[in-house]
Image (cartoon, rainbow, N blue to C red):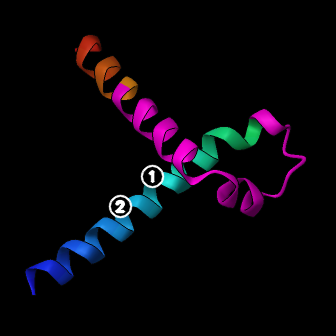
Amino acid sequence: MQTILEAIFEHFLVKFFKWIGALVRWPFYCFRKPFKEVLNDDGVANVVISVVVMVGLGIWLLVER
């Protein structure tokens, strides 16, 4: 049961990171490409971008306090 829950959690976590990364990349295409195409283009790049953005946001929030 724990393995099933881990797989489900990991699936949703990766989907969330891909969505955030695609949301960050989409304006750089000047919105000419449909969002769905940017989302499906390169999943690894979307995940990496979203992790970098979240880490940067976390560091910024810690420094601002």
- Residue 36 vs 61, above or below: the answer is below
- Residue 26 vs 11, above or below: the answer is above
Q: Position of residue 31 (x, y in %)?
A: 84, 45
Q: Which mark is residue 17?
A: 1
Whole-Å distance between the Cαs marked 2 and 1? 6 Å
Q: Nearer the viewer, residue 9 or 42?
A: 42
Q: Position of residue 57 (x, y in %)?
A: 38, 27
Residue found 52% across the figure and 54% down from its top:
18
Q: Nearer the viewer, residue 40 or 28?
A: 40
- Give the residue pinned by disc 2: 13
Helix, strand, or loop for circle 2?
helix
- The outermost residue toward the right is 32
- Residue 25 vs 13, above or below: the answer is above
In magenta stretch: residue 31: yes
Q: Position of residue 2 (x, y in %)?
A: 9, 80
What main secondary structure does the magenta stretch of the protein show?
helix
Q: Amino acid at mark 1?
A: Phe
Q: Amino acid at mark 2?
A: Leu
Q: Position of residue 55 (x, y in %)?
A: 34, 29
Q: Quadrant of the N terminus?
A: bottom left
Q: Residue 30 is drawn in which quadrant?
A: top right
Q: Quadrant of the C terminus?
A: top left
From the viewer's perspective, tell me whether residue 2 is left or right of residue 33: left
The boundaries of the magenta stretch are 28-55
Mark 2–mark 1 CB contact (< 8 Å): yes
Residue found 62% across the figure and 47% down from its top:
23
